[in-house]
Image (cartoon, rainbow, N blue to C red):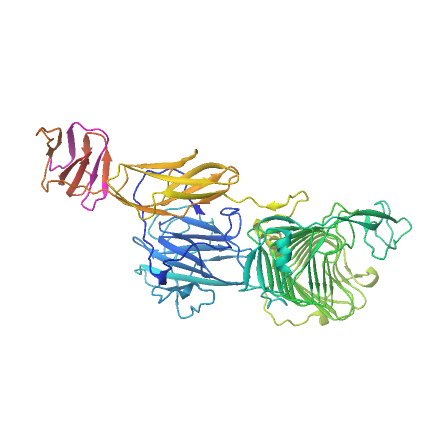
């Protein structure tokens, strides 16, 4: 997607380059990737911004994402980045004056910026540099160039690059290089016990659009990367069940005052309890080993689904909204259930209206990171989920989790089997009961640089439980608890200060709240929590647009005008199509068929892009179409002619004085405009007036064109 200035511009010759045809520079590559999105624009989701002072081809792991041949034209490519290595490569082409490319990569967790940490090579021997695992360590580091996020190194002004970006213009070490490959690799990887989880990395990529397709792909024995588009897939399978029931006015120790209570034994607790037949609707997916399930763009919404991993290994779940798991019933299954699993990573997921939380049993090498747990639940008596995360016999890292609106188990560590939980940079807010719980001497809970805000009881140690706290921030709390809810000081049990063999970074605890509230959950900073009335279906895609004529490579000789014809359509209709030459807006058309006429074309190469806007504000951008207009004065009689006779020998046009110093006069009959060119065929003046002010021009020979007449003019100083 291109970003442009809003105003209109006259047709003028702007810097355009020719992208090389050689394979070593990406010549012959076809554009396209399953990871490119079309449901949002710049600033609305993850993706890549790029602009060049010339032209470029942009690659991710060998796939050509975008290209352009006009200087100063910002392009945004909506992207889904996969866990593992992401190799960004740019084949940059220098045009006039200074070279350079400017890039910003917005990923869910963080942004990456072009700068001196990138690698550069001006003489690649082949195109292997596009590949994911290419070794570029022998390349030199890129050199930062002049320019800013609003101006190219050669001084061309532009708009559309993210405000406040840390990106720098970069090129090879020799600014005279006409071409250079710039390359940067970043890795999306879990922090903590689950750091070695790779999921379906390098396996087949499939895109699913229905519950049945996702179930089939996730339960397959084959390794897969499963892409789930933006939108909501409804998995609910409604059926009648019998539960124990109490009205909210009853509060017994057995039930806690819940309206619904799941009890598989059929025995209801409390004298006030009765049975009641209601609907239950969760649907399980038995996720098999070596899978990556990832929501595209700003996240995919999975309603009523329980993701279950039993005795499997190496699974990544990322950028998903998991919600509406029987929120009206207590202990009626989980959002994510891990049992006897290894190498698990649940990242940037949002959880809401989950009956029994996320439970983890006998699982090793697992990380939950950058997730948002929202426990507010209007379908229970006290308006909150009772359970959030229950852990037994497992090694789990909780990294950057926002625990919001819960009333317990964030998390709860219990059972007899030894277990370790490492919590770093977590934000706990508005918890009416307890947060982190250790229920035995072998249940080690280590909490670092986490913020407890409005949590009644931040920590609970019972039955010899051990917790080590370091660098935490406590605001609006009541007390830390021991056995029988006895008040204690902040726990610092040395036995819970276990060693970990993985690197991790602790945020300033005063920043943890702002980091977690702005970047956790599906979609991170661009995401939203599910709404209960969200309808099933994919997010509306943007329109499509293509330039039908002229075709790229076409040439025009002495054209009076050039018409650009465009085809555009979309699910929401088309509001308008705008036309751009380079980064300058030529105009727009609101009625199909869409077209724009360039009148009095310049003598230059044009790079045209069409931008379609649908009726919901979504935008689509065509690929550039490049053509040339040759305004080539001829039939000048090779002499210094100041008048032009017609076929009868009359003199309908006279130009004088010639040579001229200041003012030149045109006499005779002509309609339309005249144009004045230098000897490099560059238009220096045009108009329709008969008195032409020449004093501002340099001394030399010029060519005056009036309709079919061509006259040489000598300019003296």
Q: Which corner quadrant holds the C terminus?
A: top left
Could you say which is closer to the camera, residue 648 or residue 132? 648
Q: Residue at x 21, y 44 (%)?
A: 681
Residue 559 percent location from the top left of the image: 26, 39
Could you say which is closer to the camera, residue 630 or residue 475? 630
Q: Based on the displayed image, in which of its 4 quarters is residue 135 positioned?
A: bottom left
Q: Based on the displayed image, in which of its 4 quarters is residue 520 positioned?
A: bottom right
Q: Looking at the image, can residue 312 be seen?
A: yes
Position of residue 31 relative to residue 673, above or below, is: below
Position of residue 425 relative to residue 158, above or below, is: below
Q: Based on the displayed image, in which of its 4 quarters is residue 587 positioned?
A: top left
Magenta-span inclusion, residue 685: no
Q: Looking at the image, can residue 369 be seen?
A: no
- In the displayed image of the protein, which residue is found farthest to the top? 669
Compared across the picture, whether 115 is left or right of 456 comes to left
Residue 426 percent location from the top left of the image: 65, 58
Number of marks in the rendered image = 0
Specify the segment rendered in magenta: 656-683
Residue 225 percent location from the top left of the image: 57, 60
Compared across the picture, whether 151 is left or right of 315 comes to left
Residue 539 percent location from the top left of the image: 57, 45
Q: Residue at x 60, y 70 (%)?
A: 502
Magenta-span inclusion, residue 675: yes
């Amino acid at each position: 997607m291109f970003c442009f200035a809003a105003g209109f511009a006259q047709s003028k010759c702007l810097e355009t380059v020719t992208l090389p045809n050689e394979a070593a520079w990406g010549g012959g590559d076809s554009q396209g990737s399953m990871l490119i999105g079309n449901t949002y624009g710049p600033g609305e989701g993850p993706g890549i911004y790029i602009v060049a002072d010339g032209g470029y081809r942009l690659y991710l792991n060998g796939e050509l994402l975008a290209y352009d041949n006009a200087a100063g034209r910002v392009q945004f490519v909506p992207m889904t980045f996969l866990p593992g290595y992401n190799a960004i490569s740019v084949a940059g082409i220098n045009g006039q004056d200074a070279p350079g490319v400017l890039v910003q990569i917005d990923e869910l967790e963080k942004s990456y910026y072009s700068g001196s940490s990138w690698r550069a090579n001006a003489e690649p021997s082949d195109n292997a540099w596009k590949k994911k695992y290419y070794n570029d360590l022998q390349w030199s580091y890129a050199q930062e160039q002049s320019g800013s996020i609003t101006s190219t190194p050669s001084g061309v002004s532009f708009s559309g690059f993210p405000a406040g970006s840390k990106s720098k213009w970069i090129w090879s070490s020799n600014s005279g290089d006409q071409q250079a490959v710039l390359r940067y690799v970043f890795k999306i990887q879990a922090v903590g016990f689950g750091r070695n989880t790779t999921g379906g990395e390098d396996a087949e990529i499939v895109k699913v659009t229905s519950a049945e397709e996702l179930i089939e792909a996730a339960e397959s024995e084959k390794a897969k990367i499963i892409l789930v588009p933006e939108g909501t897939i409804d998995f609910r399978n409604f059926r009648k069940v019998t539960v124990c029931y109490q009205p909210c006015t009853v509060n017994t120790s057995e039930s806690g005052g819940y309206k619904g209570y799941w009890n598989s034994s059929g025995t209801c607790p409390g004298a006030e309890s009765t049975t009641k037949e209601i609907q239950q609707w969760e649907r399980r997916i038995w996720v098999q080993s070596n899978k990556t399930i990832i929501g595209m763009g700003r996240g995919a919404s999975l309603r009523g689904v329980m993701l279950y991993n039993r005795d499997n290994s190496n699974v990544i779940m990322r950028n998903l909204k998991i919600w509406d798991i029987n929120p009206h019933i207590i202990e009626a299954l989980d959002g994510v259930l891990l049992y006897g699993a290894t190498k698990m990573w649940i990242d940037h997921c949002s959880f809401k209206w989950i009956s029994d939380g996320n439970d983890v049993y006998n699982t090793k090498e697992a990380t939950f990171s950058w997730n948002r747990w929202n426990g507010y639940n209007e379908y229970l008596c006290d308006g909150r989920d009772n359970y959030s995360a229950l852990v037994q016999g497992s090694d789990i890292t909780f990294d950057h989790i926002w625990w919001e609106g819960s009333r317990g188990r964030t998390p709860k560590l219990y059972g007899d089997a030894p277990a370790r939980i490492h919590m770093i940079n977590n934000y706990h807010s508005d918890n009416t009961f307890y947060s982190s719980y250790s229920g035995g001497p072998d249940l080690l809970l280590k909490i670092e640089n986490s913020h407890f805000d409005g949590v009644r009881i931040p920590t609970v140690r019972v039955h010899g439980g051990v917790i080590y706290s370091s660098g935490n921030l406590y605001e609006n709390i009541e007390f830390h608890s021991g056995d029988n809810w006895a008040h204690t000081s902040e726990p610092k049990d040395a036995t819970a200060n276990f060693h970990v063999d993985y690197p991790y970074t602790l945020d300033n605890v005063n920043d943890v709240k702002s980091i977690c509230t702005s970047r956790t959950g599906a979609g991170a900073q661009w995401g939203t929590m599910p709404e209960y009335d969200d309808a099933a279906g994919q997010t509306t895609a943007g329109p499509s647009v293509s330039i039908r004529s002229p075709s790229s490579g076409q040439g025009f000789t002495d054209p009076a005008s050039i018409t650009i014809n465009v085809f555009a359509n979309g699910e929401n209709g088309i509001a308008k199509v705008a036309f751009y030459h380079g980064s300058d807006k030529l105009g727009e058309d609101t009625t199909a068929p869409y077209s724009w006429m360039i009148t009095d074309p310049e003598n230059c190469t044009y790079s045209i892009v069409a931008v379609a806007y649908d009726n919901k504000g979504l935008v689509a951008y065509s690929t550039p179409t490049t053509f040339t207009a040759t305004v080539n004065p001829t039939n000048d009689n090779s002499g210094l002619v100041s008048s032009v006779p017609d076929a009868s020998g009359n003199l309908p046009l006279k130009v004088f004085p010639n040579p001229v110093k200041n003012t030149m006069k045109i006499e005779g009959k002509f309609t339309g405009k005249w144009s004045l060119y230098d000897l490099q065929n560059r238009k220096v003046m045009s108009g329709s007036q008969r008195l032409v002010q020449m004093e501002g021009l340099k001394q030399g020979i010029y060519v005056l064109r009036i309709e079919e007449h061509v006259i040489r003019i000598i300019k003296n100083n």
